[in-house]
Amino acid sequence: MKILHFLTSINTGGAEKFCVDLCNTQANISDHRIYLCVLDKLENQPLLNSISNNVTLISLNKEGGYNLKIIYKIYQLLSKIEPDTIHLNGRALIYTSLAILFKQIPSIYTVHTMADKEYNKYIKKYIKLLFHNFPSLFIPVSISQSVSRTVQIVYGNSFNKIIYNGSSELNVSTNIDLVTNEINILKKDEGTLVFVSVGRISPEKNTLLLVKSFNKLLEDGKNVCLCIVGYDTTKEQVYMTMCKDTNKYHDRIKFVGQKDNVADYLQSADASCLTSNYEGLGIAALEAFSMGVPVLSTPSGGPSDIIISGINGYVSKYISVESYVDILMDFIAKPLNDRRKIFEIYKDNFTMQICAKQYLELYKLRLK
């Protein structure tokens, strides 16, 4: 079977990391031919270096938005490869839909976030038309129960297929000692609890709430430090500046920027922090679990589906500084340090191999 995956870009977002990991794993565990097409130009992104040699990487060098030129390029690619099935992520659905209709190739569309937040009302109407009028060609797959509920509300109750996101186990790099020293500088003493946040710095990820919460802890004399791993993808970086200006404790709260050695930071962490306003599931949470690190999350959607309170993390009651501080205080009072148990939950439910096998089975069912 020839399987063609589509991404619009190869940035280090959750959907992109998921897709690359999925391609690599499917190529590793099966004899199928795996293709990954990135619509945009291939920039110098860390994810490019992680794509397996067993995956055929293609770029259509798209510039600008939606146009007839890119539609024709996609049609040509489908004619050349003649894939048996197509796997779509993000806005790739919008760009590829006409070519898929012309070529009559069944596709899977992974919904990575809340369906009501994903697109404007006009695009949602178009996608709903595709799902309802061409069910043999387009089917949505939700990455969590929380996402599935929004998909059914937006597109229809019959679209209830769920395949939980998976993530490959992380491993520390040769820079582990440097990172350990970097974090040790943030610590007051050996008793300092280390918290790490991994992900895009943006209003959706609510990094400002995170900084304010740790300001409050440090104001109250709690022995904690916070390492924020991520970057603001906007050119102006207004939100990043706002977050840094809000930080009252530069010696205990540190922005370290974009890193491709996330495991090194998680290795030193007592807990990983998620403060999103909404979240489909969160690759960052799965990566933390793969290192045996508990996750402290806002009730943003997907994370609530996979966090077992008091075992592999805590979920705050509300999305607010006060509520998030409450679970930070719960963790300070009772750190969740059974890394073996957290890893076992991950291994039994959320590895990329489990996820990849489920998608391979779904591709086969779609071809019958």
Image (spheres, helix red, strand yellow):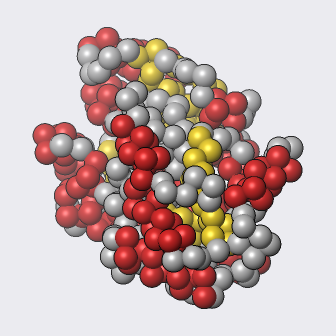
Taking the image as shown, residue 355 lies to the left or right of residue 159, namely right
Query: 50 above or below 358?
Result: above
Question: With 353 as the anchor, is 18 left or right in this view?
Answer: left
**Rendered location of residue 237, percent (x, y):** 40, 34
Instruction: State the image quarter where residue 168 is shown.
Output: bottom right
Vertical arrangement, residue 255 with respect to residue 317, above or below: above
Residue at 57% of width from left, 47% of height from top?
Answer: 255
Residue found at x 45% / y 21%: 40
How many discs appear?
0
* Picture layout, residue 224 above or below residue 82: below
* Residue 292 in sight in this render: no
Q: Within the image, what quadrant is residue 339 found in?
A: bottom right
Residue drawn at (38%, 78%), measured in percent from left and top?
Answer: 323
Left or right of 256? Residue 146 is left
Against 105, residue 224 (above or below) is below
**Position of residue 346 measured from the top left corner of the image (x, y, whole percent):** 65, 70
- Residue at far top of view: 69
Residue 210 location, x and y as percent? 46, 62
Q: Nearer the viewer, residue 69 or 259?
A: 259
Examine the rendering and report whether any part of residue 223 can be seen: yes
Residue 342 spot, x, y in % from top left = 68, 76
Q: Nearer the viewer, residue 79 or 269?
A: 269
Q: Is residue 356 left or right of residue 186?
A: left
Q: Quadrant of the N terminus?
A: top right
Which is more toward the observer, 120 or 209? 209
